[in-house]
Amino acid sequence: MENLDTEAYRSKRYNSEMTLCLLQLNRPGSEKSKPGIGLNEENLRSMSAILTQRLRKSDGLGRLDEGIFAFMLPQTKVKEARAIVTRALQSFQDTLTANEDPHVEMALGLAAQRLQANESAAELYARAQENLRSSAPRMISPDTA
């Protein structure tokens, strides 16, 4: 959260847009409130490696929970963030064919804006969480290519 606060400060200082993405992976049919439970560890490591490759050095990446990845994209608009996520998911989908458990559900929460002087990184995070909760899960498998 410290890096998020630092980037939020920069975003305010330079009046630039910032996007926070929360990507949740689940085993199909599992409760959305229990991310990652029952997921193959190989799937989680694969997604982590793909996101690390796709993100810029100025971006931040972390795992918040068993199956929730958070990444901040400074100076990035929602449209650009969606493009990054789409490319990462396509790469992830390609890795599923060689995996023992090739079916994964994904939900995404994005929050982006130019933070005002009175807004904090915590508010951006809360918006991303709310968008994640309201997001409909999408199946990712080799069959959906």
Image: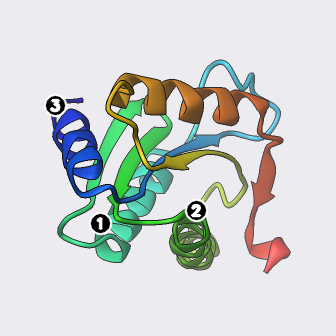
Q: Which mark is residue 2?
A: 3
Residue at the spot x=64%, y=54% of the render?
101
Sequence order check, earlier mark of 3 and 2: 3
Which one is in front, 76 or 41? 76
Q: Residues within 10 Å of mark 1 (few under 14, many from 20)?
A: some
Is residue 38 visible from the viewing direction of this image? Answer: no
Instruction: Give the residue number, with chain letter if any, for mark 1.
Output: 52
Mark 3 → mark 2, Cα distance in angstroms: 22 Å
In the rendered image, the quadrant that contains the C terminus is bottom right
Label 2: element kind: helix
Residue at the spot x=51%, y=65% of the render?
77
Which amino acid does the dot numbered 1 rest on? Thr
Quarter-wise, where is residue 47 in the image? bottom left
Q: Are marks 3 and 1 in contact (CB under 8 Å)?
A: no
Asked if residue 130 lies left or right of residue 50, the reply is: right
Which amino acid does the dot numbered 2 rest on? Val
Is residue 101 visible from the viewing direction of this image? Answer: yes
Which one is in front, 113 or 94? 113
Quarter-wise, where is residue 83 in the image? bottom right
Asked if residue 5 lies left or right of residue 87, the reply is: left
Q: Position of residue 108 (x, y in %)?
A: 64, 47
Instruction: Give the residue number, with chain letter if any, for mark 2.
Output: 78
Sequence order check, earlier mark of 1 and 2: 1
